[in-house]
Image (cartoon, rainbow, N blue to C red):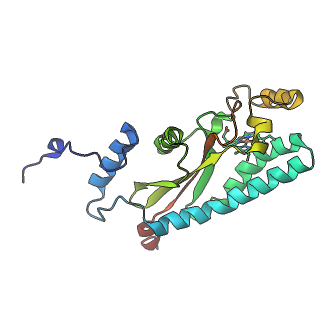
Amino acid sequence: MSSSKRGSRDKPVHFTLAGGSVLMATLLLVGCQAAEPTAEVSSREMERAKSALQPLKEQLVDALTGALQEGDPESAIAICREKAPQIAAEMSVNGIRMGRTSHRLRNPENAPEPWVEPLLAAYLEDPENPQPRAVRLNDSTIGYVEPIYAMSFCLSCHGPSLEPTLEATIRSLYPEDRATGFRMNDVRGLFWVTLPSDAGSETGT
Ligand code: HEC
């Protein structure tokens, strides 16, 4: 068969999120045909990703509610600022990495990685759909995300109007803050995790 790489401009895989991810998925499919032509993330992989993320989610909410219940928003800020990245770093072992990101960032260091951007955009377009989403990043790694919705207690630091002292502290720590003005149930951002795919972890030894 004569090479017709350019000829096949047919349907761009099945997740039509944005040009970037479609292109990436196409490249990946072309690249790993020798191994497995599957682009779907399996339900087993979804489960592994979900449980990898679980402790970060739980510990963060526990730590935050604890600090706020003690009426100490300043130390709650420290939790978001220090504890969240610390927990994420501790959980990022065995080829797993995770974190939080948003379309309206407080800390620019939490900017979304390129593969996350179309997934984040998809939640913003369809905020009613909280289903986790996943993509294959290469033949040994998957990326998985879950949306983060604003709850009422988040609004003391991310809502439309902040208590003045708290606002001043946040503004001095984060001069480029864009993470206020959220309302209950708004998509605040997402949790992301990358981890070895089933194929990657099985052949990894
Ligand atoms: C006491 C203040 C405070 C409360 C309450 C709070 N946050 Fe934050 N949030 C912060 C700070 C400070 C950061 C920046 C953390 C950093 O430097 O990485 C942040 C960062 C984030 C980020 C990472 C993306 C970014 O903008 O940098 C997300 C997502 C987030 N918060 C969601 C929430 C949600 C959801 C809640 C409620 C469950 C919540 N926050 C409650 C202060 C708070």
Q: Residue at x 69, y 26 (%)?
A: 176
Towards the viewer: 44 or 194? 44
Can you give x and y, in whole percent of width and height, for residue 11 in the image?
Answer: 25, 46
Q: Residue at x 71, y 31 (%)?
A: 180
Q: Position of residue 86 (x, y in %)?
A: 73, 52
Ligand 1: which quarter? top right
Residue for point 87% across, 26% down: 164
* Residue 159 seen by the camera: yes
The residue depicted at 61 percent of the width and 42 percent of the height is 189
The image quadrant that residue 103 belongs to is top right
Q: Name above or below for residue 48 compared with residue 100.
A: below
Q: In the image as oriented, which residue stretches furthest toward the left?
A: 1
How many marks can you see?
0
Is 53 left, or right, of 65 in this rendering?
Answer: left
Instruction: Name the spot of residue 127 as percent of width and height, x first.
Output: 55, 43
198 w.r.t. 141: above or below: below
Please identify the quadrant where the N terminus is shown. bottom left
- Can I make out residue 81 in this image? no
Left or right: 136 as drawn, with respect to 55? left
x then y, percent, for residue 18: 39, 39
Q: Nearer the viewer, residue 89 or 50?
A: 50
Choose top left, top right, bottom left or bottom right for residue 162. top right
